[in-house]
């Protein structure tokens, strides 16, 4: 989708600190981290929100990306997987936040409900 920053990162038109990439998913460091580890897991295909994903393959690819990152970053002792929708979602392209380590308790991401 034109002018979508996460589509541009997925197609390498925009740069990011990439942690994982395959045909369906890209994961990269948040530019506004609220935890020691704060990665965004993003499908390369544009879906506005999690509820719009209509392909089980994409959901599984997202889950597999999380599994891989938890293993490679040694996060199995404690992590959070967070996603937002509607007015709580800042970028209108599906993204899951994978968080670990010290969290900022005053973060809007965790407290805005
Ligand atoms: Zn997009």
Image (cartoon, rainbow, N blue to C red):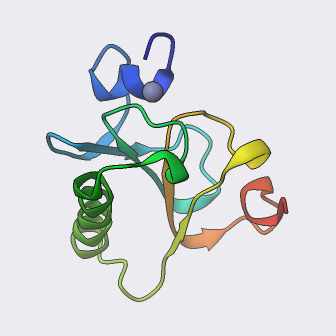
Q: Is residue 72 above or below residue 56?
A: below
Indicate the position of residue 12 as horizontal and vertical percent values: 27, 20
Q: Nearer the viewer, residue 19 or 89?
A: 89
Foreground residue among 76 and 50: 50
Q: Image quadrant for the N terminus?
A: top left
Give left or right: position of 77 versus 86: left
| Residue projecting furthest to the front | 54
106 left or right, relative to 33:
right
> Can residue 9 be seen at all in this image of the molecule?
yes
On the image, which quarter does residue 29 sit in? top left
Q: Position of residue 112 (x, y in %)?
A: 84, 59
The correct choice, above or below, for 18 with respect to 35 in the image is above
x and y percentages locating residue 80 in the rendered image: 53, 74
Please tell me which residue is depicted at 68% across the width and 38% down the height of the picture: 90
Q: Quadrant of residue 76?
A: bottom left
List x then y, in percent, for residue 18: 30, 40
């Amino acid at each position: 989708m034109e002018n979508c920053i996460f589509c541009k990162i997925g197609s390498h038109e925009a740069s990011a600190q990439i942690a994982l990439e395959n045909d369906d998913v890209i994961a990269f460091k948040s530019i506004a981290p609220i935890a020691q580890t704060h990665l965004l897991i993003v499908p390369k295909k544009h879906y506005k929100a999690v509820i719009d994903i209509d392909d089980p393959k994409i959901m599984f690819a997202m889950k597999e990306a999380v599994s891989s990152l938890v293993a490679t970053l040694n996060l199995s002792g404690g992590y959070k997987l967070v996603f937002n929708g509607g007015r709580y979602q800042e970028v209108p392209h599906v993204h899951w936040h994978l968080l670990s380590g010290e969290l900022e308790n005053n973060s809007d991401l965790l407290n805005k409900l």
